[in-house]
């Protein structure tokens, strides 16, 4: 390798490792800040509230819909296409 290329590569590696170290250090400080200010607790409470709402609202609706689908099954191939309906009406 050319000496200039080695120098360039060395500068790149030094800058890259410094940037990575700085990023890890900032993430560590952010985690400590979040823990000190109760962000983790509030996030856990929010997840719990949303989970309860999901169980109380979404799941019963889904169960009701699946029950209704079971009561009124569609026969595969029993219907006619929209194009065929339009042809029969004379609109197509």
Image: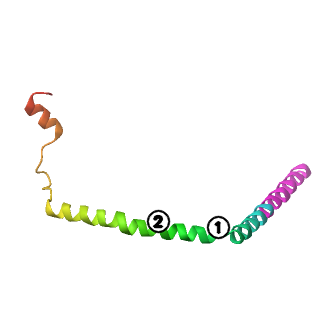
Answer with left or right where residue 45 lies relative to residue 9: left
For residue 29, which numbered disc appears in the image?
none
Residue nearer the viewer, 19 or 43: 43
* The magenta stretch spans residue 54: no
| Residue drawn at the location 35% of the way across and 63% of the way down | 58
What span is colored magenta in the figure?
Answer: 1-21
| Label 1 SS | helix
Q: Nearer the viewer, residue 56 or 32?
A: 56
Place residue 19 in its image quadrant: bottom right
Percent position of residue 2, x then y = 88, 51
Image position of 2 (left or right of 34): right
Q: Nearer the viewer, residue 88 or 43?
A: 43
Residue 86 image-quadrant placement: top left
- Residue wearing tag 1: 39
Query: Front-most of 26 and 38?
Result: 38
In the rendered view, tell whether residue 57 sits above or below residue 6.
Answer: below
| Residue 40 placement (x, y as % from top left) | 63, 70
Q: Residue at x 27, y 66 (%)?
A: 63
- Kindly identify the residue that appears in the image at 19 percent across and 61 percent down: 68
Q: Position of residue 35 (x, y in %)?
A: 69, 71
Which of the 4 quarters of the picture holds residue 70? bottom left
| 3D distance between C-alphas at marks 2 and 1 | 16 Å
Look at the numbered disc 2 and give the secondary structure of its residue. helix
Which mark sits nearer the N-terminus, 2 or 1? 1
Position of residue 76 measured from the top left corner of the image (x, y, whole percent):
15, 54
Q: Residues within 10 Å of mark 2 (few under 14, many from 20)?
A: few
Q: Quadrant of the C terminus?
A: top left
Kindly identify which residue carries mark 2: 50
**In the drawing, does residue 55 fall left or right of residue 77?**
right
Residue 42 horizontal side relative to residue 24, left or right:
left
């Amino acid at each position: 390798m050319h000496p200039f290329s080695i120098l360039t590569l060395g500068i790149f590696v030094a800058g890259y490792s410094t940037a990575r170290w700085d990023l890890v250090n900032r993430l560590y400080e952010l985690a400590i800040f979040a823990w000190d200010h109760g962000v983790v607790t509030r996030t856990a409470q929010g997840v719990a509230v949303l989970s309860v709402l999901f169980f109380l609202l979404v799941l019963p609706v889904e169960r009701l819909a699946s029950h209704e689908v079971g009561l009124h099954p569609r026969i595969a191939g029993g219907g006619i296409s929209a194009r065929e309906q339009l042809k029969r009406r004379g609109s197509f």
